[in-house]
Image (cartoon, coloured by chain):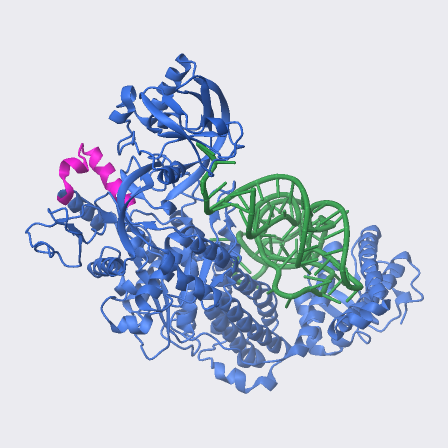
Amino acid sequence: MEKDRYHPEEIEAFWYQKWEEAGCFKAENYTKKPYVIVIPPPNITGYLHIGHALNNTIQDILIRWKRMSGFNALWVPGTDHAGIATQNVVEKELMKKGLSREALGREKFLKEVWLWREKYGNRIIEQLKRLWASCDWSRLCFTMDENLSHAVQTVFVSLYKKGLIYRGTRIINWCPRCTTALSDEEVEYREEVGHLYYIRYPMEGKGFIVVATTRPETMLGDTAVAVHPEDIRYKDLIGENIHLPFVDRLIPIIADQQVEQEFGTGAVKVTPSHDPNDYSIARRHNLQFITVMDTTGRMNKNAAIFAGLDRFSCREEILKKLKEKNLIEKIEPYTHRVGHCYRCDTVIEPYISEQWFVKMKELAGPAIKVVHDGELRFYPERWAKIYLQWLDNIHDWCISRQIWWGHRIPVWYCSNEKCPPIVSVETPERCPFCGCGHPVQDPDVLDTWFSSWLWPFAVFGWPEKTRDLEIFYPTDTLVTAQEILFFWVARMVMAGFEFMGKKPFSSVYINGTVRDKTGKKMSKSLGNAIDPVEIIDEAGADSLRFGLISLTSFGQDVFLPDGFHYKGRNFLNKIWNSFRYLEMLAEKNQVERISFSAIREEIEKLKISERWILMLLDRKIQHVSDCLENFRFNEASDSLYDFYWHQYCDWYIEMSKMYPEKDQYLVSKVIPVLFYVMARTLKLLHPFIPFITEELWHRLKKFTDVDGDFIATSSWPEPDGFSFEETLEKMDEIKKIVIEIRDLKTTFRIPVNHNLDVDYRGISLLSDPWHRTMVEFLARVRFNSVERSLQDKPDDEIVRIWESGWFSMKVRGIIDIATEMKKLSSEKDKISKIFEETSRKLSNEEFLKRAPAEVIEKTRKLQNELASELNKIEKNLKLLTGSNHECDN
RNA sequence: AGGCGGUUAGCUCAGUCGGCAAGAGCGCUUCCCUUACAAGGAAGAGGUCGUGGGUUCGAUUCCCUCACCGCCUACCA
């Protein structure tokens, strides 16, 4: 037989295609109970990164498991139009060609974006698809699809009519690079080292008041200085005026509770148009709002001599001028949080403008209740608290964006300014209020998340009352990342109740974040990303999946070490080669049609080894199913790994080699059990490593009567209900003896198939010839039955006492007594300690009184085992020191 | 400032209701290309489970303190 390794490339490509051709992933069997997951739609600008890989592997495991478990499993795929991100990408492309969106104009620009989308927008889907995701691709959705647009408009109009959407002039987060408003969630705060500048503001009378600020350039827009009403330092100054430098403006000193006396000097400059705090102070005090920047972050005409400067150069300039005027008291280093645009990383500018908002308080109610009532659960549970905390403090949602790529706001304005806005799904011909002819549509588009939050029902055709909507909504499980808990998850729950009257899903599994060695999130822009596609090219999707899953315990962040996928890769190789052994075995013994049902019918004819592995398999089926039920993916995959490799391969397959070719028991029982365990384990492994299991499933068909056309659509195994508990103890004993002999053989370098003198009158397990054969085979020795006394032990033999019998082996050359002594002594010490501990426990009345019976029983049993072990070691030690008379049995 | 997560073998991590003689993968040591597999096999070494208290018959596990690492929220300019 030739050496072989598992080569995934062709196999993975082959089966993916077959699955699709056969429609394995289509959720078409409406007689079955549905199980539904909607994918968190990746951005069309995205590449598959390791975070997607983890997130989608988990979804795929759930879907495949449920599909096999008899559900009409539906995984809805789709992509997100990602308004700002996509517009930025296309603008960059245009820039390369010397074009700009302004030069093209709205219509032509949008054409470009659609072209770009046609060309690259499905790249990430192709990656997912080629690689593993068992989505129902016939239902692929896009957030800019016509029905999605229709849903978005319907929702807007409905919320507007309920008074939950309004238009207003507020201070909002503005990105001067993207020149658009952003929601609070779209701003990323980062600690940055800056300065705190103490500036002297000359008072109208005489003297100065010193204010502290991190942003001196905004002073040009100051319309007051505020102090705390009870601050004795400034009490008398309230109502005085300040002569604001550069802009020639008198501004008052006012008193406001919001001012912290301890911070800075206790006096704060108030810039209502460029700071959210100052904005609220200004509203309380009816201050003037003076905007000193334009939409791109340049100082405007209100900035007097600084007009035209960029906001950051203006800061430098103004500091220079202040120094010249001796108006800087001091400058301190200061670390503070600075908001950045989540799409382009530009520093956010608080900015006053007219935008559309959604009132969130009312919508949040049902979303809070459903979690309180336990009808929507988070896994891990701690996320519920974070979710609730956000909803409890929810602010209105700014939904209008001053970009072009996205859902146009369904609002028109009449030329007559007295007419209210026309809010309608259909384009109005004329103004319904005054009848005039040319209503103009609002130029803005909606926040991308304003379409994403409708995802769980919009993908099924809402607002139409479709059959899909009726059958598949609400969905079951949402698998997503922590970073979009507020952006997306919370808003979906709100939308679900508002528009469907029902929660959109009942379980939310928040998978961990994949981080690099320094704890940073893996991302392309940070340059610390591991490219999953590269790993797949190298070792296959199964290896990647297995490696990822193995490292991600219940919602914990994942810290990827180099070569994390080797575990999976090696495992696949093990599976591959063990399968080849089975094939070879079947062919050699001319076994063709193995009937699994026969195994179950003739249980009583099975020997301990078969019963043992069947029992372990049964337990494993139960365990893996339980793990999946509780989102314990790594526990499931690791316990399957252990079972397959360290029980099935290391022991059971090895045992099968003890039978001669065409042995009756081998052919009639062992081979069927080998195949049976293989087949069932492959099913359990399928959700984790779909490709190799599918390949082997089809190879199994040559020998067995496995069910289903594909393993992907076969049935999830149920335990047979075997309870051969007694085999466990015996197999453990056999393993122990085998390991003991192997240890001796290693220590004393004894050759293979050495003759071992054994007195098994006292070793009860070995009184069974079949057990003896098995031990001999596994330990690669031959037993000579002897009944001589240990006193007659020749000097070139080493002896091990086991229970009340013993075995002895001839040792070539020098027996290294010292090595053996050392080993036994340290073993003795170790066991003695534990023995003492258990003794103490068992003589403790409180323990006996309070501990549960099974714990006491367990401790007693351990105590006995330790005692007999100590006894053995004692005797063995005595043998080595030569005083072997007493231990002769 | 609050909240959350982490701290277990050299490295990366498991350890579900307190009752283990504390596990895995990689790495390390010794031996073996034995007819499924060297991406393999056999046998090993390696941990006072971050600190200090407490509860308990019993704590890696529960409670409190502290330390360090990380994350998330917050209108201290």
Q: Nearer the viewer, residue A749 or A340?
A: A340
Which range of residues does the magenta coloring cover? Answer: A84-107
Q: Position of residue A159 (x, y in %)?
A: 27, 59
Question: What residue occupies the far left of the structure in this picture?
Answer: A437
Query: Picture coordinates of residue A576 (x, y %)?
Result: 47, 62
Q: Colour of chain B?
A: green
Horizontal and vertical percent position of residue A599: 53, 82
Q: Which chain is blue?
A: A
Q: Is residue A96 magenta?
A: yes
Give the overall secondary structure of the magenta segment.
helix
Q: Is residue A79 visible?
A: no
Residue drawn at x 66%, y 69% is A777
Q: Is A356 situated left or right of A8 in this image?
A: left
Residue A303 x %, y %:
29, 24
Quadrant position of residue A17: bottom left
Q: Is residue A175 above or below residue A696?
A: above
Query: What is the tally of numbered marks visible in this picture?
Result: 0
Question: Which corner quadrant of the image does residue A346 belong to?
Answer: top left
Judging depth in this view, the residue of A74 and A531 nearest the camera is A74
Question: What residue lies at 42% left-to-right and 15% top-to-bottom?
Answer: A323
Q: Is residue A118 magenta?
A: no
Identified at 90% across, 69% down, the residue is A888
**Left or right of residue A261: residue A29:** left
